[in-house]
Image: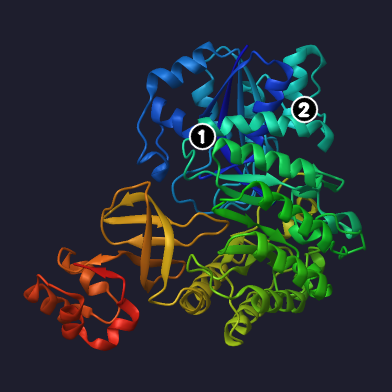
Amino acid sequence: MRVAIVDGYTDEPAGLGVPPYLGIYPRYAYGAIKKADKGANVFYLTIDDLRATFGGENGIATRNKTSNFPKTKKILETADVIVYIGGLHTPGKYLSAVPSQVDEVAEFLRPFKGIKILGGPAFMGSAHQGGTKITSRELLLAQTVFDHIAYGDLEAFLFDYTKNPKDADPFRFRDYTELRDYAILGAEVVRQFPDFPDFVVVEIETQRGCPKAMGIGGCSFCTEPVRYRVVEDRPVKDVVAEVKALYDLGVRHFRVGRQSCIFSYMAKPNGRVPVPNPEAIEKLFAGMRSVVPDVKTLHVDNANPAVIANYPEESMRIAKALIKYGTPGNVVAFGLESADPKVAKLNNLNATAEETYEAVRILNEVGARRGYNGIPWLLPGINIIFGLPGETKKSYEITFQFLKRLLDDGLMVRRINIRQVVVFPGTPLWHMRNKVKVEKHKRLIQHYRHKIRHEIDLPMLKRVVPVGTVLRDVRAEVFDNGLTYGRQIGSYPLIVGIPKQIQLNRFYDVLIVDHGFRSITGIPVPININRESPKTLELIPGIGRKTAIKLLVKRPFRSEDEFFKLVGEEKRELLGGLITL
């Protein structure tokens, strides 16, 4: 049997699969097919392979990619089964990849004869950037193009289908015992990932379902408790075995992001706020680190700030374990959503503003020390959602003042993610959709988004990465309009704009010289002061245009001492070791 897996990329509340991140769905799908039929030929393609081959360039996603028309077309023409994986539930801004929509991929796949299967969170629909609702149009379209839609776990359906198509139940879910072999066998697909081996970040699953939802229900907008109605913790030994298999294949970057709250892994249920289990989390991360001795990235993602605030001693142990066994630049995303207590109550949100403040303070106490890659070891992120039911004009100001308090009190937040609410069928919000405030408060939302970016993000970014900071191992990803854009590999890496064209898909150490609202400007070091362009010389901290002109006149310099004599000896403290001749 020949199977083509088309990865349309996924982004959902507890899981990311947009390059350079390789999500769980393609790996599990590959493993399930191989478990059912060892002789199956399984090919991995991305939506960008299809875009480059058949047209339909989607912005920056294919700007630096070349078409491999014969290979992609032949795989699809000869495939007995074509599996499409997609689903965009928490849309964001992406640097070098754009997730697909069902209607886009349907046009690509419609001409091919293989049995077509849709999997991943796409069966619930996808959220368009900035959208306030989803329509049934794409779901109806999916039913006309795809022969099967997996409403349960795609890997469970694919295993059954490969064994005997008549026995395949599209609503069946697997458990972690069944997943064990799929995960190990599926690791092999990483070899076909475009960013393998140096730049791929593999998403690792530890838990599914929402611990808070089991106590008092989930947040009004969230699809996680809709899809997984019970909480299931994945055994430590299974996680470690999968990580080892991936590491042995050459993977060096891992993101333990497939869970709603890493601090609630194997926690004890306790109503709204489960009791964390530091011993289990220490065992998990110690186990992973023991099998990845030369790991370059070991990060996490989501956490419920209420857990950290209500159990500070246990949470500090967990945070210290993440630092001890992980790598710097780690970010724990907090789902505050709104600081307005009325909105929080109506939408059953994770945490109060005071709980979130305390959680931010605790993580700063433990993780604010700067790591060897230039970024603090472990910082919080804040998720904000605008447009929730119950919002008034005052709600936006309350949230803004909460963020300003964090800034004024000297705390650090790695990033503030602002989204507009999206309504999905099956969520509590679906029944309150007539109360969604996005359209009514459109101008107000734009105003406060702008206000947060200018008055909070900019000064916060200057605090997290001051001018003169050297970020290590920044991957150059995209060149566009005179700028090379790069970022470190990690959970929420900063986008660095480099004001010149440099070779892509290489790592650089970058000196930070300026700040935007959500990104930074940097120049690669060491800086060759005899060959560097005038524009770059001007950007060196403390140089400026007048001194840059003097440098150009004086070049070539024969020693560092000669350089510092011209620009000032006080610059040696910052630039010493960062220049070359």
Point out the residue furthest to the right here. 270
The quadrant of the picture occupied by the N terminus is top right
Mark 2 or mark 1, earlier in chain: 2
Quadrant for residue 345, please give it: bottom right
Measured as percent of width and height from the top left, residue 144 is found at 64, 22
Q: Foreground: 132 or 325?
A: 325
Measured as percent of width and height from the top left, residue 492 is found at 55, 59
Secondary structure beneath dot 1 equals: loop
Res 301 visible: yes
Point out the residue furthest to the left here. 553
**Residue at screen point 19% across, 80% down:** 561
Is residue 504 shown above or below 523?
above
What's under tag 1, amino acid-wise? Answer: Phe
Q: Foreground: 440 or 111?
A: 111
Q: Foreground: 268 or 11?
A: 268
Task: Categorize mark 2 by other alpha carbons within 10 Å: few (<14), some (14-19), many (20+).
Answer: many
Mark 1, residue position? 193
What's under tag 2, amino acid-wise? Answer: Ala
* Disc ID at residue 156: 2
Q: Foreground: 28 or 9?
A: 28
Is disc 2 in contact with disc 1, using a CB cutoff of under 8 Å?
no
What's the coloring here? rainbow
Measured as percent of width and height from the top left, residue 518 is found at 47, 67
